[in-house]
Image (cartoon, grey):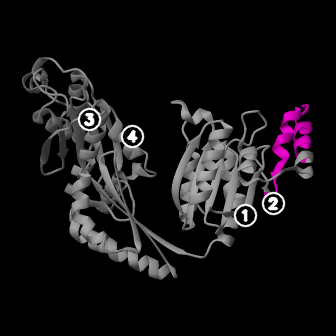
Amino acid sequence: MLAEIIAVGSEMLTPHRQDTNSLFLTAGLNDLGVEVGFKTIVGDNSHHLVEAIHNALRRADILILSGGLGPTEDDLTRECVAESLQLDLISDADTVLALQARFRARKMEMPPNNLKQAQRLEGAELLPNTNGSAPGQWLQTVIRTADGRTHPRLLILLPGPPKELKALFAEEVRSRLEDLLPQRFLARRVLRMALIPESTVDARTAPIYSRFKDIETTILAGHGEIQLHFLCAKDTQEEAEDRVNHLAELIESEMGDDIFSSDGESLEEIVLLMLGLRGLNLAVAESCTGGMLAERLTAIPNASRNFLGGAIVYSNELKSSLCKVPSKLLNQHGAVSPEVARALAEGIRDRTKSSLGLSITGIAGPTLLDGPDADKPIGLVYIGLADEEDTQVKRFMIPGDRDRVRLWATMHALEMLRLSLQ
């Protein structure tokens, strides 16, 4: 089964609003084994919307339209679907009464244009909307293509506000789809790798996953990591699970320690888990990342079991007062140096009495530093990791703008810690 989603609304064709509904709907459809082949955003223009509906009906089994079910002149979804399928719109008496009751309960007079929300497509079933005034609609129909053949089609009309759409999909649409669709058992796995090029991952793994024609493999890259998503549908859950697990094991054998998670966990989750398994705790000292590393760790529930906290030491004065970095060291080598990264890691570990101290110091830009750091390039980062026996320091050159340098610095720090714990 192939689905298409049409998001209706001119506001989503501006820089100020995004179509997030289609992400939610795609996840819901994928859970039921339905592939989303196309997504379209159409403004409040009847000609464009009718054309988009015609295109969707030619190529998709399921068409979901979100938005355009309100009472105003630019809410055109019902009318355009009716025109595309040459159907009548019928005023639903029960919906009219429900709308009138809704306005009476709010001690408001209902404007006449709200009556258009009671219009039902000929042959459609209304889907009650407990969070808004516009009901959804469910229409099973048949279309005839140019070659004279007939094809079954399902159209689902949903309101645009995410709160209404999500509830309506969960309460009314999902169960209907489950009854309509052939039963499929799905198994998923997600392998995650940090700080490795997408092309490298694909070059090493494509010869493996391409042999598994019954598994849909997707590579996602971004935020300093690569994700391999596997999806398999079989007649039984056990068969589907066995198949994706077999592929995942082969990929894990090929990529080895590059894989930090084989079940979709984030890098910070894995680091905290490893700290817990070893009975260790961590404190951090951050300069150029300004608390981003600590924020990533504390976003994980129960992080306090193994993460003590740390210090944001942007100025040299705080590097000295909070992490005991000698002023002589700062004046001689500069804040962005292996010597200061080492002193920060050791100083925060000593100050907090933690098992491990992790430090980040660097130049995120966009301007260069002065003093001893004057000749050092933007993107230069040093990361220090101290334990009771030793301190290691690594140098990184991170290309990109300020946001990328800061994000990738935290990725390098977490990955350095993970490999050390491993």
Crowding at dot 3, Cα within 10 Å, few <14 / some 14-19 / many 20+, comes out as many
| Badge 2 or badge 1: first in the primary sequence | 2
- The residue to which callout 3 is attached is 405
Q: Which residue is mark 1?
A: 140
> Is residue 212 left or right of 365 when viewed as pictured?
right
Dot placed on the residue nearer the N-terminal end, 1 or 4: 1
Disc 1 to disc 4, C-alpha distance? 48 Å
Circle 2 sits on which residue?
123
Q: Tell me which numbered mark, 4 or 2, is placed earlier along the sequence.
A: 2
Foreground disc of the pair 2, 3: 2
- Residue 357: say if magenta: no
Q: Which amino acid, by three-letter code, is at mark 3?
A: Val
Q: Which residue is mark 4?
A: 295
Outermost residue to the left: 332
89 on left or right of 300: right
Q: Earlier in the sequence, mark 3 or mark 1?
A: 1
Sequence-wise, which precedes: disc 3 or disc 4?
A: 4
Q: Quadrant of the N terminus?
A: bottom right
Q: Is residue 130 left or right of residue 307?
A: right
